[in-house]
Amino acid sequence: MNEELAITVGAAARAARARLGLTQADVAERVGIAMEVYSRMERGKVLPSVTTLRRLCQVLRIGADTLLGLEVVVLAPPLEEGAADAPPGEDPPRLRRLMRALRALDAAQLKAVAQVVHGALGLLRR
């Protein structure tokens, strides 16, 4: 493995992910790889396959030249939380993180969370 290339890809992926306001879990889910694998990729410990590289470019909205360090691009500053919600047809990052947390709950925990949410919504409507 070319360590210098792996570090370059990881740094570019991390910068693009931050610019989009995504978590590592968000990117891994969209790309279709384990979060641990994506984390290792960002740390320059592993290089993506060609297929994964292509999906990374799509998800991170970055060109392969930039991701591979062949082109230097000045990235926009990181977005504020919720400042640029997801593109049409996609859930915003906050909602995706909430959904992941809810999926990990058992039935009783989910019922309790639902009651809290419904109570809070009732207070907001007043």
Image (spheres, rainbow, N blue to C red):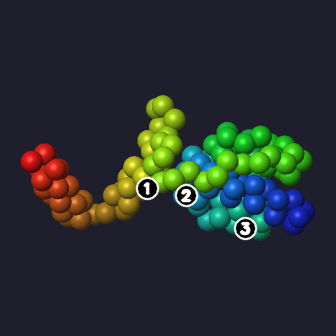
Q: State the residue at coordinates (51%, 43%).
A: 84
Q: CA distance from mark 3 to mark 2?
A: 14 Å
Mark 3 and mark 1 lie on one chain; the one further toward the N terminus is 3
User: Residue 43 shows which numbered tag?
Assistant: 3
Label 2 residue SS: loop
Amino acid residing under circle 2 = Thr
Gap in Å between the C-alphas at discs 3 and 1? 22 Å
**Residue under pointer 1:** 97
Where 104 falls versus 53 (above or below)?
Answer: below
Residue plotted at (16% across, 50% down): 124
x, y percent for residue 1: 88, 63
Q: Which residue is mark 2?
A: 23
Question: Residue 118 location, x and y as percent?
Answer: 15, 52
Q: Is residue 52 left or right of residue 99?
A: right
User: Residue 105, percent across and down?
Assistant: 31, 63
- Sort mark 1 into few (<14), some (14-19) or many (20+) by Cα contacts within 10 Å: some
Q: Is residue 52 visible?
A: no
* Front position in the image: 50 or 17: 17
Give the amino acid at mark 1: Arg
Left or right of residue 110: residue 79: right
Residue 70, labelled with which disc? Answer: none
Residue 20 screen position, x and y as percent: 59, 48
| Disc 3 secondary structure class | loop
- The answer to whether mark 2 and mark 1 are in CB contact below 8 A is yes
- The residue type indicated by label 3 comes to Arg
Seen in the picture, residue 30 relative to 36 is either above or below; the reply is above
Image quadrant of residue 38? Answer: bottom right
